[in-house]
Image (cartoon, rainbow, N blue to C red):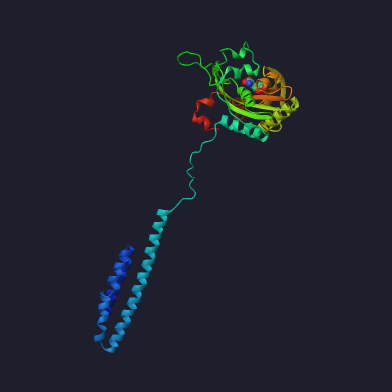
Amino acid sequence: MSAEEIDRIRDEALAALRAAATLEELDEARTRRLGKRSALAELQRTLGGLEPDARRELGAAINAVRGELAEAEAARRRELEEERDRVVLAAEAVDVTLPPRRPATGHLHPVAETMEAMLDVLTGLGYAVVEGPEVETDWHNFDALNTPPDHPARSLNDTIYVHRLDGVEAVADDGSTGVLLRTQTSPMQIRAMLASEPPLYVAVPGRVYRSDTPDATHLPMFHQIEGLAVDTDLSFADLKGSLEVAARALLGDDVALRFRPHFFPFTEPSCELDAWYGGRWIELLGAGMVHPNVLAAGGYDPEEVQGFAWGMGVDRMAMLRHDIADLRLFVENDLRFLSSL
Ligand code: DAH
């Protein structure tokens, strides 16, 4: 066995180990070059037949080659493992700097948002929230609210009456005729009084209807919140104080407010409340001390109790809060408009 032959075995084995392109190939190369059936092992098996000196010499040479090959194998293994880890990490990498994909979330419609904000304030003041029917009788909507039959608000121009499809006059559940779409939330004043004894503090949100042609400031359907307080010791000062607190909670503490005399059939005296907003006075609501005839229609004794009431337009308040110039945007449901808010 010549030294050249050992060198040849070593060189071939080293080349094979270094050329392994995968961990599997490296395992294979190790078995072939260092295993029991390798040229090196075969050589080792010849040691027994040699003279002691030659045996020692060849044995040392074989051991040296074995050590060298084991080292080369380990080095190549480290390289291949590192490379495998790099590939796996790259494949599984998460780029934490990428912007997240946010699910598109909705939000309340500006009118609903304004409604909720108002009702929050009112419930904070002790009012109970109640709702009433949108299809009403003209007794609740007008007569009981001290609105005489010849009042202009009753004209067909303003009020949408409900008819049966066959043209026969519609009759309400309670047998009354004169069925209409309520023009205001005020009829719930009557229903609330008829339903419970004083003292009474109720807030009534809801849709109301008038036969108006839609434009920037009018819609045939819009929203009001009615307030009614009835107790044994209520004065106009209570009305002013309550409405001021509510208006400031909604529009800010420093908003300028003014009460202006007005007329409503169901209140006496009556007023309107304006807020200075965007450089002009904006009408927020109508209000007043509940007319004795209205208390009586609700089954209350006007000698025993007094009340104040108000009705405010929610849509106009939403226009102020969201800086919107045209009411019609509220009902078109254009997502470009709604999601811009
Ligand atoms: N119902 C009135 C309207 O629609 C608003 C209103 C004014 C309601 C005065 C009231 C009130 O309760 O006292 O224009």
Q: Is residue 283 visible?
A: no
Q: Residue at x 31, y 64 (%)?
A: 24
Q: Is residue 155 above or below residue 77?
A: above
Can you tell which quarter of the image residue 68 is in?
bottom left
Q: Is residue 107 above or below residue 145?
A: below
Q: Is residue 89 above or below residue 43?
A: above
Q: Residue at x 26, y 85 (%)?
A: 48
Q: Is residue 165 left or right of residue 11?
A: right
Q: Is residue 289 left or right of residue 32?
A: right
Q: Is residue 150 left or right of residue 94?
A: right
Q: Is residue 130 above or below residue 36?
A: above
Where residue 123 appears, x then y in whole percent? 65, 34
Where residue 109 appears, x then y in whole percent? 54, 31
Can you tell which quarter of the image residue 238 is in?
top right
Where residue 148 appears, x then y in whole percent? 64, 13
Can you tell which quarter of the image residue 179 is in?
top right
Q: Residue at x 60, y 20 (%)?
A: 140
Quadrant of ligand 1: it is top right
Q: Is residue 103 visible?
A: yes
